[in-house]
Amino acid sequence: MRHRQAIAVLALVGFFVALYLWFYKIGVIGELKCGTGSCEYVQTSRWATLLGQPVALYGVAGYLVLFVIALAGLQPRLLSNPAPTRLLAALAFVGFAFTLYLTYLELFVIHAVCRWCMGSAVIITLIAGIAVAAALRTPAIRTGP
Amino acid sequence: MKRFYGLLVAVAVVAGVLIWKGTRPGPGEASTAGAPPVAFTAADSAFRGYAQGSDSAPVEIVEYADLQCPHCGEFAVVQFPTIREQLISTGRVRWRMRDFPLNFSWSRVSALAAQCAGEQGRYWEMVDAMYQAQSDWGRSTKNPSGQFRDMARRVGVDGNRFDACVDSHRYDGRIEASRAQGQALGVSDTPTFFVNGRMKTDNNLSSDRFQQIVDSAIAATQQH
């Protein structure tokens, strides 16, 4: 139960980080509070858009899905069911792999680092770590007689 | 469990308040984000941007840019001088600049300043000066209008006429029309380039790449 609670909290924080970046991208927020980072440089680059949509929007959707699954997994009838944990691990792993790609772009292609993106990278890494560790502890699915 | 849900609510409230505060301009800031849309006229839409290069050049490159966008600034300072020397000055390319203000604090302020310098025939000189100093004014939270006025005077613009132009906001509609036209063409980021009307889709902004593109475009026009 603890791991699903931890994932829910982290996913909620990640959701708001992604929401902040998405709001910037669509013009709701005029300027990113980034300290000495290069958030605007990264967010105005071509790589901040994927398949016609801001990358941050994928983050908003992804964290929301993780949050909803984690919360659903905390309902009494699903507490002992390993399926939510496995689903969280699979989705978080996909998110982690996507974040690795984005971080590669920041470091080696754009040559600038967005602090908010790094924050999101840390969050999804933690979620993936917790979810995968929990999934590995769940009993294996029995197949056959 | 109550403590857990309490924590979720606390996270949501704190993050919501922080994001809401982020949508408000701070002291001394004048963010244009969320500002009402600017109306524009048919005359505004008819203006196709300032151009440099021969009218008979076989290739026209249209650049949609935001003067505060760091990528536009880097391109202008690092690559464009070579493009100007090798492609524009040689009569191979006519370069046209269109405004595509993003949501930086000074996107529209800077575009207006450039248009007002253009009114006095100093558009490109002003744009060059603004890009050269972009790392200064572009990162400032204070309105850079005073800096723009100084730049305008340095490039030979009459200060009083420039001030009157900026104060009148008479080119706001033209800037908005340019942004709307870019959006209709699929522009979402800056700088975005169109080579003889076709959007350049790769991310290589080097002058060498533009040289290749222009060579291909000229070869294509000669075949037809």
Image: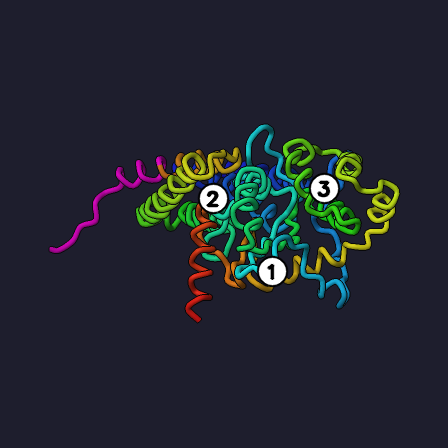
Label 1: chain letter: B
**Image side of residue B161 versus residue B44, left or right:** right
In the image, what residue type sits under mark 1?
Gln
* Span colored in magenta: A129-145
Label 3: chain letter: B
Please say which color scheme the image uses: rainbow
* Disc ID at residue B24: 3
The foreground one among B132 and B54 is B54
The residue beneath circle 2 is: B206
For label 3, the SS is: loop
Q: Residue sitting at 49 percent across and 51 percent down?
A: A49
- Please provide percent x and percent y for residue A88: 36, 46
The foreground one among B126 and A16 is B126
The residue beneath circle 1 is: B183
Label whose residue precedes the other's in the sequence (3 or 1): 3
Q: Is residue B197 above or below residue B129?
A: below
Label 2: chain letter: B
Characterize the local packing of mark 2: few (<14), some (14-19) or many (20 or more) Cα atoms within 10 angstroms: some
- Residue A49 seen in the figure: yes
Q: Residue sitting at 38 percent across and 42 percent down?
A: A101
- Please provide percent x and percent y for residue B28: 78, 34
Q: CA distance from mark 1 to mark 2?
A: 24 Å
View extreme (top): residue: A36
